[in-house]
Amino acid sequence: MRVAALYDVHAMPHALEAVLAEVEGAAVDAIVFGGDVICGPLPLETLELVRSVDAQFVRGNCERDPGEWLVQKLAPDAIEAARAWPATLELDGVLYCHATPKSDMPILTEASQEERFAEALEGVDARLVVAGHTHMQFRRGRFVNAGSVGMPYEGDVAAFWAIVGDDVEFRRTTFDNERAAAEIRASGWPNAEQFVTENLLAAPARAETIAYFESLV
């Protein structure tokens, strides 16, 4: 079974649209959205795209605890439906979760100590565990981070996702970042200018982001 794992879209429809176009030609059997799908600049447009495909969902911390912008932009039933997404999903022996199987908040990066991966996977029999949350693609043993479609920390302005089958194929997809920047600036989102400057006109450096995340642990 080939599964397109699309994580951390963060309400970036321009990136998601480009990824879905590639998914259509990738001969996948299923699509899994791995949480933090609709919290970000353009939730309505993103929700419309998400609803246009046959997909399964895992709840992220943003769906569990939506912010004021999301509450303003989406109907209450849409927010409640996202809150009701499961914390984990198992397909073909692979467990999909947002951060770890136990919680949607722990930080794991490629530099994390082995003990933290062992703790995260304790009691989990799945052949692979696919997560996101820290927005960087990597694999450590059975643990896979699929990357982020809408807010990656890869040192590169693009969308990052994965196809999970017998193995894991990490994917990178370009999109029209200038169009995205213009529409986000016009959205009224309070974080628009900072996001455009730091994530669309430039890209967060992977090594610096890993160092920052590890300093929080």
Image: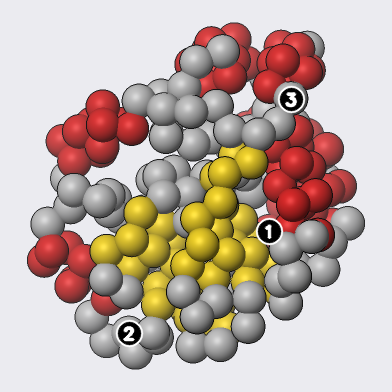
Which residue is nearer to you in this view: 130 or 187? 130
> In which quadrant is the N terminus drawn?
bottom right
Looking at the rendered image, the disc whose residue lies closer to the viewer, 2 or 1, is 2
Tell me which amino acid carries mark 2.
Answer: Val
> In which quadrant is the C terminus drawn?
top left
The disc placed on residue 82 is 1
Dot 3 and dot 1 residues touching (CB under 8 Å): no
**Secondary element type, mark 1:** helix
Q: Residue at x 71, y 71 (%)?
A: 28
The colour scheme is secondary structure
Q: Earlier in the sequence, mark 2 or mark 1?
A: 1
Provide residue 70's location: percent of width, then percent of height.
68, 37
The disc placed on residue 176 is 3
Label 1, residues with CA under 10 Å away: few <14, some 14-19, many ≥20 = many
Task: Using the numbered discs, state the Cα–Cα distance from disc 2 to disc 1 in whole angstroms.
Answer: 25 Å
Tell me which amino acid carries mark 1.
Answer: Ala
- Kindly identify which residue carries mark 2: 124
